[in-house]
Image: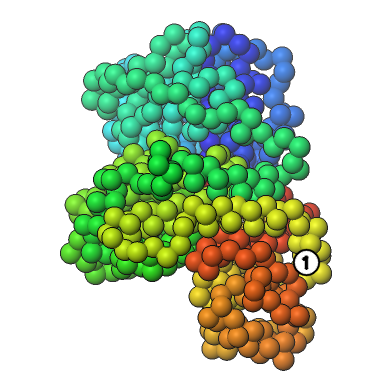
Amino acid sequence: MCGIVGYIGYKDVKEILLNGLEKLEYRGYDSAGIAVRNEKGVHVFREKGRIADLRQTVDVNVQAVTGIGHTRWATHGVPSKDNAHPHQSTAGRFTLVHNGVIENYEQLKKEYLLDVPMKSDTDTEVIVQLVEIFANEGLDTEAAFRKTLQMLKGSYALALLDAEQEETIFVAKNKSPLLVGLGEGFNVVASDAMAMIQITDQFVELMDKEMVIVTKEKVTIKNLDGQEIQRAPYTAELDASDIEKGTYPHYMLKEIDEQPLVMRKIIQAYQNDQGKLTIDQGIIQALNEADRLYIVACGTSYHAGLVGKQFLEKVAKIPTEVHVASEFGYNMPLLSEKPLFIFISQSGETADSRAVLVKVKEMGCKALTITNVQGSTLSREADYTLLLHAGPEIAVASTKAYTAQIAVLSILAHATAESRGIKLEFDLIHELGIVANAMEVLCDTKAEFEQIARDYLASTRNCFFIGRALDYYVSLEGALKLKEISYIQAEGFAGGELKHGTIALIEEGTPVVALATQQDVNLSIRGNVKEVVARGANPCIISMKGLESEEDRFVIPAVHELLTPLAAVVPMQLIAYYAALHRSCDVDKPRNLAKSVTVE
Ligand code: F6R
């Protein structure tokens, strides 16, 4: 969701910015722009649509070594060229890109900008106009920027150019991610290390309410009182090849295929020298001291949390609740005496989850973040972090992060159970190995899922996913995958719940994907299939070896009953992928969606 890049150095900046923005495309956006500064002033190029459209508008004859760029995911104002960033102040002296939401922009406009004609509907323009007003009152750029920052309420990552100040990018951050990257004779700014990993792997983290003055030689971090802050850089452990598609047509397909490898990486990462699965003792102690766990997450990560609850309750025997982050603020449950919060977030930047984290930390609660991104906001602000080791997930639709989240939660439950002297009934390393093999078989059977997508989803308006027990949670995820990338109206239901209303929607030919991987409820879910077939549905039963029946469309290799979501979700992902492909949808960048959802 919105992305920022900036470069200041010695090379022509246009291509560096455009390449960087392309690396941020996965976050989701609907317009893009760059501004470059040279001795003639600042030149702005913006376009609605894709970076490829922006490329067409950039004047190749403009040479510059300083610039900023932005991908915008519309919040204030429709996606349009006028609302695209960078935005400029009235006199054109200042040029700004912004991620986040300024909550008090209307109020600031009324107070300071009544006489200033606005050129866009964005909250961002208010910031750049304020900087100009304060600069016109006699403040230097740094002071005018700082004064503006002190007035802003909300979230921001900002990069600012001053046409009158040679080769400097002014940067600031509050609640939205932003990094500064260090190079030899150049420095960069990026929302995500991925955008600039081709030219540097040395990054400096920025904390909330910090501003940075970036020149090609120097990076100076200050707090909003103007005091300088020293911070050492870290090496981003990101391989440039991790973020390339290679021979794959889409990142999503690559990431689905990477899942067996991710399972094996996770086993390795959490295995000690004696070959046992192990989790940091501080984390285990926190779980053991808690009388109840509260999992908080959004979307796919929430679905992984539902599966995680089963492990934590059934294996580790700790009562666990799962909550949608965006609702938690208003529907906060009555908390137990010793709660422990577990935030599950692929990106570690999701604003809804972060808002809950901030709130529960204020209440004095402890928190663990399970994330794919080391150093992400949720990781930094929680007491403990567990990493997913899934590698960068670039397709907007989450696949390998979901299975990694479930695998890490299973290890967490397993290690906690062991520490409590609970006798474990299965060897998790062995079972996760079986899962990895099953995933491989499923990934090698793509043609089958492509055919299912063709047979059931080519022209349908809607599709239902049903399951019971753990299969219910996978149904929710299957429906989410399908709707987000193919735009087919899809809903996941507990098999038994259909008859309480939703069955009214079943018509002649309505596709119903039924999961049957749970022994205890195998007959019941098949009963639900009969109910919908009697009303004209076109059923697609996906079962598991050992539970199969003649009517099944596909049989998944057997895995441990508690780990079935890890295998059962792969057909869901592939069916969604091929349905989207057959409908000519933009698989990796579905409409209206963002990868990193940094607004509440
Ligand atoms: C769906 C998807 C989203 C995310 C959700 C939370 O495929 O990716 O539903 O799961 O936006 O994001 P994270 O996990 O980054 O907190």
Left or right of 118, for residue 115? left
Above or below for 13 versus 443: above
Residue at numbered disc 1: 452
Above or below for 177 versus 137: below
Q: Quadrant of residue 312?
A: bottom left
Image position, residue 276 (x, y; %): 41, 47
Left or right of 400, for residue 157? left
Element assignment for label 1:
helix
Image position, residue 203 (x, y; %): 44, 23
Image position, residue 380 (x, y; %): 34, 39
- Point out the residue furthest to the front here: 274
Residue under the image location 67 percent in, 15 percent down: 62
In terms of depth relative to the viewer, which is nearer, 152 or 72?
A: 72
Image position, residue 476 (x, y; %): 56, 68
Residue under the image location 48 percent in, 60 percent down: 304
* Residue density around tag 1, few if under 14, some if 14–19, many if 20 or more, within 10 Å: many
Residue under the image location 61 percent in, 49 percent down: 260
Above or below for 196 versus 475: above
Q: How is the image coloured?
A: rainbow
Q: Quadrant of residue 150?
A: top left
| Viewer can see residue 149 | no
Residue under the image location 64 percent in, 70 percent down: 544
| Viewer can see residue 319 | yes
In terms of depth relative to the viewer, which is nearer, 600 or 514?
A: 514
